[in-house]
Amino acid sequence: MKRISSFIKQATIILYLLSIQSCSAQSQLIADEKETVSVENLQYYLYFPKGYEETESEKFPLLLFLHGGGEAGGTLEDLKTNGPPKLLAEGKEFPFLILAPQNPYKRKWWNTRAVMQLLDTIIETNRVDIDRIYLSGLSRGGSAAWELAVQYPDKFAALAVVCGMTPVPYAAWINKKLPIWVFHGTEDKSIPISESEDMVTKLKEMGYDVTFTRYEGVGHNAWVRAYNTEELYEWLMKQKMTKE
């Protein structure tokens, strides 16, 4: 009997230990919360048009320009190799302010939240017509421009995208009243023209105001022709946010 009693006690202890191990091995779902802070250091160029200083009461349109991957992560001077910053460096004048930030990371996408914080700061500290804020970008910057149009549908009066990747599934999130002009080269090997074709087709099916310029035989550097198109800037200046 003593042996049986001892065996029962030992078995009981073993079962107890096994049950503890079983409980400790179970997964747990814990609800918690942590406030995070992300800080981004954005260098940028800010261009002021002729007459800005003389007309202290007048507000001016502003173009937010986002560069491509080739200008990311280097010096601010790199921005002068393409797009409006290049034209400015060559002496071209524009009738609106131009904000051209630099993506500080060579291999990272644009931090669109940081870009918007910078834009809001520039708007608050300068005489910017908030109903005439234009958005444009090329390549990786063109992709970011689409993203901004999706995430901030009530911010921009016009959108011009050159050879950017597109968020087709979220096309309906873009402001239905936003005028859009898309440029792409048919021989683009980096970002296929199908990216723009699919997005333009989707937007037109939903009744958006979209213009699509295809450059036959042109590769990824479609921005050379796009940003040298004077009609683009004339078109931008005609656009204004419409109030509901």
Image (spheres, rainbow, N blue to C red):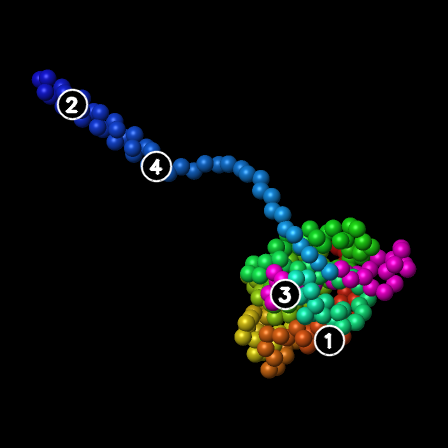
Disc 2, SS? helix
Foreground tag (3 vs 4) = 3
The crowding category of the residue bearing disc 3, from other C-alpha atoms within 10 Å (few below 14, some 14 to 19, many at least 20), is many
What number is the disc on residue 221? none
Residue 76 at x, y percent in the picture:
68, 62
- Location of the C terminus by quadrant is bottom right
Q: CA distance from mark 1 to mark 4?
A: 64 Å
Quarter holding the N terminus is: top left
Q: Position of residue 34 (x, y in %)?
A: 55, 38
Q: Residue furthest top?
A: 2
Kind of residue sitting beneath label 1 = Thr
In front of the other: 30 or 221 = 221
Closer-to-camera residue (187/46): 46
Figure check: 178 above or below 194: above
Q: Earlier in the sequence, mark 2 or mark 3?
A: 2
Question: In terms of depth relative to the viewer, which is nearer, 232 or 202?
Answer: 232
> In which quarter of the view is residue 178 placed?
bottom right
Q: Disc 1 or disc 3, which is closer to the eye?
A: 3
Which residue position is annotated with label 2?
Answer: 8
CB atoms of marks 1 and 2 within 8 Å: no
What amino acid type should be assigned to the residue bearing mark 4?
Answer: Gln
Query: What residue would you read off at disc 4?
Result: 26
Which span of residues is magenta-colored? Answer: 46-74
Residue that label 1 marks: 229
Label 3 near label 2: C-beta < 8 Å? no
**Amino acid, disc 2:** Ile
Task: Write the residue at 76% across / 60% down.
Answer: 46
Disc 3: which residue: 71
Please, what secondary structure does the residue beneath circle 4 have?
A: loop
Query: Vertical placement of 142 versus 224: above or below?
Result: above
Residue 38 on the magenta segment: no
Identify the mark nearer the N-term, 1 or 4: 4
